[in-house]
Image: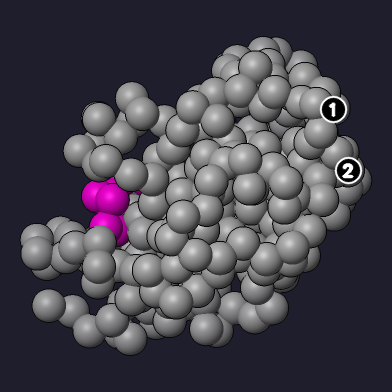
């Protein structure tokens, strides 16, 4: 089995050099999720400050497709944030793709093995439309679930709109539209994230509790991609619109 520090180093170098590497599962068929999360924790320790967290594989259909009963998660580095109006520099990435997100901003800590979706909503100071920029460090964007967890679930960049109060909003029913260069490429609803985006965040809080960790006030959580991700390059413009939350645009250069 490959050493976790060695793999973390290879993934860090791949991102820095913008060069894809071979998936660890190709060389080591026994590479598993538990080991992958150990690799991810090493990457997290070198990526301070921690801005928050992100979820992946929150669609029940996708879970069935890849043989998982639960989502996976990664972390958000503060340095990976893209500001409103700032363009995404695709030359600093390997194979970027964008997907729409419902983003939670936490107003207080959430900890423990029994956190519920209702508690997530009560603890959130705001919810916002977001765009996550994915960028696999693996060749041809192909990987097992263990591979992608080790690669911090393909996290690269993210941009978050202005938060609004979650009070009175049924996020399950929020319509989502993803556009690229003015053309609608995908639609969904908030229910695509584990039936309710807050349920996805609650799952994350419970999962972190297993490792003695928790969600902290001030952190953001990307609750899971709501559509398939769309590839982007220089000159592309991605727009995400979500009912009650507004619209967000990201230009690429």
- Nearer to us in this view, 105 or 26: 105
What's the distance in space between the residues labelled 2 and 1, CA to CA?
8 Å
**Is 7 drawn above or below residue 128 in the view shown?**
below
Residue for point 44% across, 37% down: 58
Residue for point 30% across, 35% down: 63
Percent coordinates x, y for residue 60 in the rendering: 36, 29
Q: Determine whether label 2 and label 1 are within 8 Å by CB.
A: yes
Q: Name the residue under label 2.
A: 162
Q: Mark 1 points at which residue?
A: 246
**Is 201 drawn above or below residue 45 in the view shown?**
above
Label 2's element? loop
Please check the rendered image and state whether residue 143 is part of the magenta-colored stretch, yes or no.
yes
Specify the segment rendered in magenta: 141-147
Seen as rendered, the residue at the extreme left is: 29
Which of the marked residues, 2 or 1, is nearer the chain's N terminus? Answer: 2
Residue for point 77% across, 41% down: 127
**Is 246 drawn above or below residue 104 in the view shown?**
above
């Amino acid at each position: 089995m490959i050493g976790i520090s060695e793999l973390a180093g290879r993934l860090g170098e791949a991102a820095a050099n913008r060069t894809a590497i071979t998936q660890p599962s190709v060389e080591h068929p026994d590479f598993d999720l538990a080991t992958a999360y150990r690799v991810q924790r090493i990457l997290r320790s070198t990526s301070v400050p921690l801005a928050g967290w992100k979820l992946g594989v929150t669609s029940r259909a996708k879970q069935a497709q890849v043989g998982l009963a639960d989502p996976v998660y990664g972390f958000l580095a503060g340095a990976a944030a893209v500001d409103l109006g700032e363009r995404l520099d695709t030359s600093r990435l390997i194979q970027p793709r964008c997907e729409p997100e419902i983003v939670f901003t936490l107003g207080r800590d959430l900890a423990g093995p029994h956190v519920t979706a209702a508690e997530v909503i009560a603890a959130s100071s705001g919810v916002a439309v977001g765009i996550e920029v994915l960028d696999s460090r693996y060749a041809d964007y192909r990987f097992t679930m263990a591979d992608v967890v080790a690669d911090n679930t393909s996290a690269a960049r993210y941009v978050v709109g202005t938060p609004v109060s979650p009070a009175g909003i049924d996020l399950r029913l929020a319509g989502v539209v993803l556009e690229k260069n003015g053309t609608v490429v995908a639609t969904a609803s908030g229910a695509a994230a584990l039936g309710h985006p807050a349920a996805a965040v609650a799952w994350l809080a419970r999962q972190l509790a297993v490792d003695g960790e928790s969600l902290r006030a001030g952190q953001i959580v990307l609750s899971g991609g709501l559509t398939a991700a769309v590839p982007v390059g220089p000159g592309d413009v991605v727009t995400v619109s979500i009912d009650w939350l507004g619209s967000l645009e990201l230009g690429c250069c």
